[in-house]
Amino acid sequence: MSQEFPYVINACRGDVDEWKHLLNDALIHGTPEAPIINWKGEHSPRMVDMRLPLTNGARAGWIGKHLAWALRGGVFDTRAIASSGVPGTLVVGALLAQLPDMKACIIRPERKKYDRRRIVEGARPESVVFVDDILSGGSTAMRAIKVLGAEGISVEGVLTIVCYDWKTGAARLSSEGVKAFHLVHLQKTNQASRESGAAFFKGEFNP
């Protein structure tokens, strides 16, 4: 049975109830048997795993339609996109299914050590919109802008499915003058704010 979604959903595009249903099914709760470890190496009580809806054809298509709207006149007007990582690559796939004339490239974690030794694979457009599943601290987007720039590809802006409003990513992009749009903004409820990783788990499971 689905648990109550612990965040406030502010949808910039799409039906709020549909987003709540989709994101609630994407919400993963950590347990002692299956802990969630964040990028700092700390235990987290939960995570929104967008890989789940993005690997469901119907849901990926629904998300892709809203992203396509943003890319073709709603927010941007672009003919090329870029991304990185597994979730970002799934976002690219959802978009290419909606916009077959779109060009795309994928940023590798590091430069390939053989063949053409590229760090950016796929199309080589002059400019792109960087797309991803979630904006958190902004490090992924800022790395992408740096890597793409070094390859001669300018970044028109950043488009994500979800933005965590309590994180620093949106402010970071804004301070760098990067145009950004997010289909959904999430805000913490009081309960979610109280449940930090160490406080959420009790006893010997605490890190």
Image (cartoon, grey):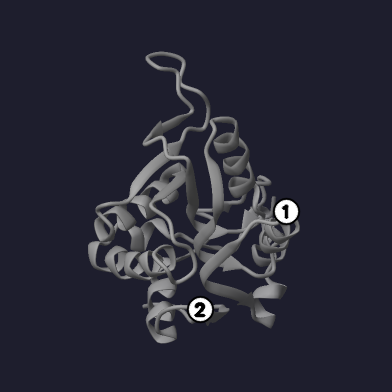
In the rendered structure, the answer to whether residue 21 lies left or right of residue 33 reads left
Q: Quadrant of the N terminus?
A: bottom left
Q: Secondary structure at mark 2?
A: loop
Q: Quadrant of residue 63?
A: bottom left
Q: Position of residue 165 (x, y in %)?
A: 65, 70
Name the residue tied to disc 2: 12
Q: Nearer the viewer, mark 2 or mark 1?
A: 1
Tell me if residue 183 comes above or below residue 123 in the rendering: below
Q: Position of residue 142 (x, y in %)?
A: 64, 46
Residue 31 makes an appearance in the image: no
Name the residue tied to disc 1: 176
In the rendered structure, the answer to whether residue 137 lies left or right of residue 24 reads right
Q: Is tag 2's residue or tag 1's residue first in the polypeptide sequence?
A: 2
Crowding at dot 1, Cα within 10 Å, few <14 / some 14-19 / many 20+, comes out as few
Question: In whole angstroms, how far apart are the C-alphas of marks 2 and 1?
Answer: 22 Å
| Residue type, label 1 | Glu
Q: Position of residue 186 (x, y in %)?
A: 58, 74
As drawn, the label of residue 146 is none
Q: How many marks?
A: 2
What residue is rendered at 70% in x and 65% in y? Answer: 196
Task: Looking at the picture, tell me which residue is in the foreground, 154 or 113.
Answer: 154
Q: Position of residue 166 (x, y in %)?
A: 69, 69
Q: Quadrant of residue 3?
A: bottom left
In the rendered structure, the answer to whether residue 172 lies left or right of residue 23 reads right
Task: Looking at the picture, tell me which residue is in the foreground, 41 or 207.
Answer: 41
Residue 120 makes an appearance in the image: yes
